Image (cartoon, rainbow, N blue to C red):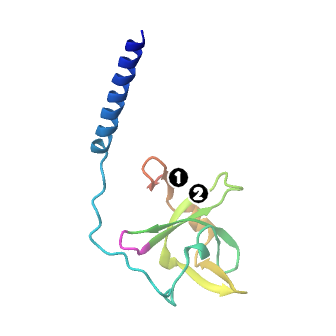
Amino acid sequence: MSKSLILIASAMTIAASLALAEAPTKMTMAPASTTTTEFLSTIPSNALLVSNIYDRNVYDAGENKLGEIKDIVIDRSGTIGAVIVSVGGFLGVGDKDVAVAFEAVNISQRNNKTWLSMNTTKAALMSATGFKFDKSQGLWTLGQK
């Protein structure tokens, strides 16, 4: 009986070793980057922090709240192409997500805080094409929320 247990234990050890030996060959690895990482010793003086824009309110010229910036769309070159503004609704219910060109957002300072405004109205934003976030693809797609 003890020979059987030893034989089974040995077979399981060999099978586990073979399974572990095959595992790395089944994984796909991203190719190594050919560029060197550049480290900065200073932050550019004209830098704009995402934390000063993301999840912040946006106002119209009359200082009425239009909505809130819920996402920032950046292309592969690092250029901000758009912001996603959540407009309407109450406590996240009934809101609409609208893509707005980044250049349309006016960024200034008030009382040492970032102030975001746009030359538009809430009605114009509500009538614009809505977007929804597709979690399975990790991107914004056309279609009202």
Q: Quadrant of residue 74?
A: bottom left
Disc 1 marks a residue whose amino acid type is Gln
Q: Residue at x 58, y 74 (%)?
A: 120
Instruction: State the separation of the CA atoms marked 1 and 2.
Output: 7 Å
Dividing the image into 4 quarters, which one contains the N terminus? top left
Residues drawn in magenta:
76-80
Relative to 3, 41 lies left or right? right
Residue placed most toward the observer, 11 or 116: 11
Say whether residue 77 is magenta: yes
Q: Which is the main secondary structure of the residues drawn in magenta?
A: loop
Disc 2 marks a residue whose amino acid type is Lys
User: Is the residue under label 2 in contact with that under label 1 (CB below 8 Å)?
Assistant: yes
Q: Residues within 10 Å of mark 1 (few under 14, many from 20)?
A: some
Residue 21 in the image: x percent, y percent? 30, 39
Q: Residue at x 59, y 62 (%)?
A: 126
Location of residue 76 with respect to 141 vertically, above or below:
below
Q: Which residue is mark 1?
A: 144
Say whether residue 93 is magenta: no
